């Protein structure tokens, strides 16, 4: 879920996660304090108890500090855990609790017993009070809980949403407690809370789960339909004995592959999306025919680290032992930070939970990273509960808070690395074991499918086409069809009326031609210039050199075509170049809108692309269609657009210039701009 939750702008991304967490930064360092702290962080800490710790001792210290959060920041009656808390001074924390954080807390109590930090009877009593509260008092709808709650009453906090992912993270903690404590009353309450969840209701008639639900707006149109932290969500739903989802839902999840620095993986930039499900489920040496998710997380972590190393010349926070991009607090608020492959956002901010919670995937690298944060960064980052949420040396910024879900992921994954406690305990859970079998998991690893870029033929029309939007001159051929199976981001209705496109390509010695018929139940066309990207548009991504489209490179192209309602005009913009002016006389299009969508017919002169056309030559190109609905929900379908090896370098589909002949037309390529030829006029 782009999503911690992984709901960054994919991103969902990141599942995503920016909707799942809230809270403003509680302060920044002054310039004077910054320079003093910077001096401190550049020096090894002198305190004897901070230096020379063994790996085991350091992990024990980090874990104990994180565990303390879940005992100190828990309401004594409800057991609800605060979403965040100050790390350096005792002051009022947030007024709301996190149900996901509470799920982490229930699991943390088992770790505390295992490590001798709390006696078993006290821990079991705390778990029992929490489950009793959730069973009888916490506000819920159809078994789903609100993301944020009042810790005293269990009522919905503010305008918080019913959150399927946060409900799942709570349930994972409750089911862990049922298996770990082996107490009949705890087991009975945990299983009753689980049975109460009506998973099919959250599908809202679709094939996947809705992102959220609120009383004011109903179901969110976005969905949990991309790979992210939601694996635990879907396995719990499939394994339910009372209201299960069909196993087929597992195959509805998009798993777009990409590569960066030699690491091939499912694209989802924030590291937490590759960690959360692995807290409770041991995916080692397993695959479902789609991926080996443990290996995938290893590669995601290595790619994240490598990206930080390669960006170290630009950001002083980064380095071989200083890495970890995930959803976290930052100098300008909460953000879903991440690394390629995929659309990644970063600004020099690192979160210790990112590298630390990946210790099961990259033990050596994660241990070195945690030691660097502890010994080299030290005091500005280390407080009551251990590491603060994040820091940014370039901005002189250190988070003052810790977050429940980040402390939880750090604590629990370290424990899995040290003892496998959570993994081994959850293997006893029958529902999850059954769900994994139903989802097709089997022993052994599996490489991600890595298909060659698709090819599509462009008919040879020696004298070109007359562009009028009516497509009368096009040769009959099988079109290139894009529908919801080609979704890059967003959700589309199942009946294809929401968004679907069919396209054809042709060429002459003068130009590349294209036509696109778009089915769209609501055409939004309001903007001009570069802002047309926010409307319903057709986009062509073109890599004339065939060396990979580099984002915003002047040798590559992102050209948008947006219909002008009520006319045959088309708004055109080329973002990687100076805009429409660069294409005057070189790019032309005509089209029209109608009640079921719109049509675009256009052409691009070869000299603009600096491409010499000849029979059999391949042009690297991808077609995309962006959809905006009346409620401002959006999505994009795309032919082929895969991140490969370098940051923001993408491999595209292939258009083969084929000899087809037989269509002698007047060569007309009109931009429709003032001073340009009008439709029907020859350019010669």
Image (cartoon, helix red, strand yellow):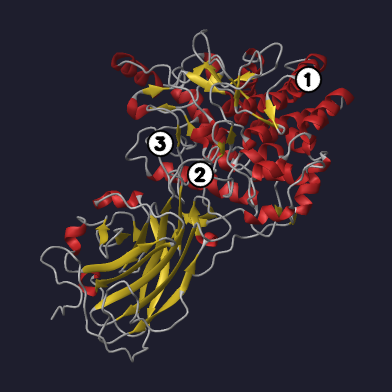
- Note whether 240 is above or below 265 in the view shown: above
Q: What residue is at 62 percent from the left and 43 percent from the top?
A: 230
Q: Position of residue 108 (x, y in %)?
A: 70, 24
Q: Residue at x 48, y 55 (%)?
A: 488
Name the residue carrying label 2.
12
Query: Circle 1 — which element?
Result: helix
Outermost residue, right side: 184
Q: Residue at x 39, y 69 (%)?
A: 516
Q: Earlier in the sequence, mark 2 or mark 1?
A: 2
Q: Against 591, is 464 above or below?
A: below
Residue 318 has which mark? Answer: 3
Q: Nearer the viewer, mark 3 or mark 2?
A: 2
For the point 53% across and 54% down, which residue is it? 492
Say which residue label 1 marks. Answer: 132
Left or right, 260 with respect to 471, comes to right
Viewer-side residue, 495 vs 193:
495
Residue 95, by quadrant, is: top right
């Amino acid at each position: 879920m782009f999503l911690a939750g992984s709901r960054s702008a994919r991103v969902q991304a990141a599942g995503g996660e920016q909707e799942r967490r809230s809270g403003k930064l509680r302060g920044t360092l002054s310039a004077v304090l910054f320079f003093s702290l910077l001096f401190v962080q550049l020096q090894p800490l002198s305190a004897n108890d901070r230096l020379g710790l063994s790996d085991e001792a350091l992990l024990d210290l980090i874990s104990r500090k994180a565990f303390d959060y879940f005992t100190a920041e828990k309401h004594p009656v409800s057991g609800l855990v605060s979403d965040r808390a100050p790390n350096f001074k005792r002051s009022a924390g947030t007024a709301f609790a996190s149900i996901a954080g509470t799920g982490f807390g229930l699991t943390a109590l088992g770790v505390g017993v295992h490590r001798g930090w709390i006696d078993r009877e006290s821990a079991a009593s705390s778990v029992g009070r929490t489950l009793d509260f959730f069973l009888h008092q916490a506000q819920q709808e159809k078994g789903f809980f609100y993301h944020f709650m009042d810790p005293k009453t269990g009522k919905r906090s503010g305008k918080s949403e019913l959150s399927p992912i946060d409900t799942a993270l709570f349930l994972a903690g409750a089911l862990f407690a049922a298996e770990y404590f082996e107490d009949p009353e705890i087991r009975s309450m945990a299983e009753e809370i689980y049975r109460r969840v009506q998973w099919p209701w959250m599908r809202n008639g679709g094939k996947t789960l809705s992102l959220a639900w609120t009383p004011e707006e109903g179901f969110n149109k976005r969905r949990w339909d991309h790979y992210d932290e939601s694996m635990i969500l879907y396995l719990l739903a499939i394994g339910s004995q009372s209201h299960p989802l069909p196993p087929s839902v597992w195959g509805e999840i998009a798993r777009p592959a990409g590569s960066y620095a030699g690491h091939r993986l499912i694209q989802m930039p924030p590291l937490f999306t590759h960690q959360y499900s692995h807290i409770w489920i041991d995916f080692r040496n397993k695959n479902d025919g789609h991926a080996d998710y443990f290996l995938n997380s290893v590669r995601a972590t290595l790619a994240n680290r490598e990206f930080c190393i390669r960006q170290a010349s630009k950001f002083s926070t980064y380095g071989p032992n200083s890495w970890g991009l995930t959803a976290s607090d930052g100098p300008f608020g909460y953000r879903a930070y991440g690394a390629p492959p995929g659309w990644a956002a970063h600004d020099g901010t690192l979160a210790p939970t990112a590298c630390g919670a990946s210790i099961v995937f990259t033990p050596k690298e994660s241990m070195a990273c945690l030691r660097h944060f502890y010994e080299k960064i030290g005091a500005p980052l280390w407080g009551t509960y251990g590491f603060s949420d994040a820091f940014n040396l370039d901005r002189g910024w250190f988070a003052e808070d810790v977050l429940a879900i980040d402390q939880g992921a750090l604590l629990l994954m370290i424990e899995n690395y040290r003892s496998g406690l959570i993994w081994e305990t959850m293997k006893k859970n029958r529902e999850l074991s059954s769900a994994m079998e139903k989802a097709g998991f089997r022993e052994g690893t599996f490489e991600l499918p890595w298909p060659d870029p698709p090819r599509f033929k462009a008919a040879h029309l020696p004298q070109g086409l007359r562009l009028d939007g009516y497509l009368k001159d096009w040769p009959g051929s099988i079109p290139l069809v894009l529908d919801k199976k080609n979704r890059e981001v967003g959700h589309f209705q199942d009946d294809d009326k929401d968004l679907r496109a069919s396209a054809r390509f042709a060429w002459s010695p003068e130009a590349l031609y294209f036509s696109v018929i778009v089915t769209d139940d609501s055409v939004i066309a309001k903007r001009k210039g570069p802002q047309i990207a926010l409307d319903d548009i057709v986009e062509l991504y073109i890599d004339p050199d065939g060396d990979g489209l580099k984002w915003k490179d002047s040798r590559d192209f992102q050209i948008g075509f947006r219909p002008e309602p009520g006319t045959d005009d088309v708004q055109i913009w080329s973002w990687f170049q100076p805009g429409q002016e660069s294409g005057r006389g070189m790019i032309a299009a005509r089209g029209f809108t109608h009640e079921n969508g719109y049509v675009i017919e256009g052409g691009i002169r070869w000299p603009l692309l600096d491409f010499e056309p000849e029979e059999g030559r391949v042009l690297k190109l991808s077609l995309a269609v962006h959809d905006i609905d009346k409620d401002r929900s959006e999505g994009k379908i795309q032919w082929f657009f895969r991140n490969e090896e370098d940051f923001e370098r993408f491999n595209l589909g292939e258009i083969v210039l084929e000899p087809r002949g037989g269509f002698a037309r007047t060569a007309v390529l009109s931009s429709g701009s003032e001073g340009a030829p009008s439709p029907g006029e020859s350019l010669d």
